[in-house]
Image (cartoon, rainbow, N blue to C red):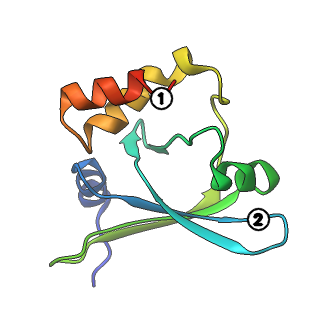
Amino acid sequence: MPKLKESERDTFLGEPGFMMNIATVDASGAPLSTPIWFVHEEGCIWFTPRQHSEWLENIRHESRIALCVDEQSMPYRKVVIRGNAELVYDVGNDDLWRDRYRRIAQRYIPLEDANAYVDGTD
């Protein structure tokens, strides 16, 4: 599979519906891979956890992560990233991230449902 050009990567990451797997490491060193919603904006991958997400606790302990977004049908495009997660907005600072989270939700569910979902998960 040929490597995606930057513009192809950005287009792929902007297509709605693809889940992202986040791989983290817990305090004992065990790996955890979790499928989550995301949005690609401003050259970054943005995602947000629930308050009691196991992977959030893992990131608090160890910021190194791996991300994978892939498609299950031809042409089998994928983007794999390794790096360090940055906690931009901590849980409880809902007003700071609500608009971005609304855009994340809109990638996966209809607009009205996404708005209700976000408003109900503060």
User: Residue 119 versus residue 4: which sits nearer the camera?
Assistant: 119
Q: Is residue 60 above or below residue 120?
A: below
Q: Is residue 17 above or below residue 100?
A: below
Q: Which residue is mark 2?
A: 26
Query: In this rendering, would 34 be left or right of 84?
Result: left
Residue at the bottom extreme? Answer: 1
Residue at the front extreme? Answer: 120
Q: Which residue is mark 1?
A: 121
Residue drawn at (38%, 44%) of the image: 40
Q: Amino acid at mark 1?
A: Thr
Which of the 4 image quarters holds residue 32?
bottom right
Q: Earlier in the sequence, mark 2 or mark 1?
A: 2
User: Residue 69 versus residue 27: which sits nearer the camera?
Assistant: 27
Indicate the position of residue 115 as horizontal and vertical percent values: 30, 24
Residue drawn at (28%, 31%) of the image: 114
Mark 2 and mark 1: Cα distance apart in space: 25 Å
Which of the 4 image quarters holds residue 54?
bottom right
Indicate the position of residue 34 as horizontal and vertical percent values: 52, 63
Query: In this rendering, would 97 be left or right of 2?
Result: right
Within 10 Å of the Cα at label 2, are there few (<14), some (14-19), or many (20+) other Cα atoms? some
* Callout 2: SS: loop
Query: In this rendering, would 73 be left or right of 7?
Result: left
Q: Nearer the viewer, mark 2 or mark 1?
A: 1
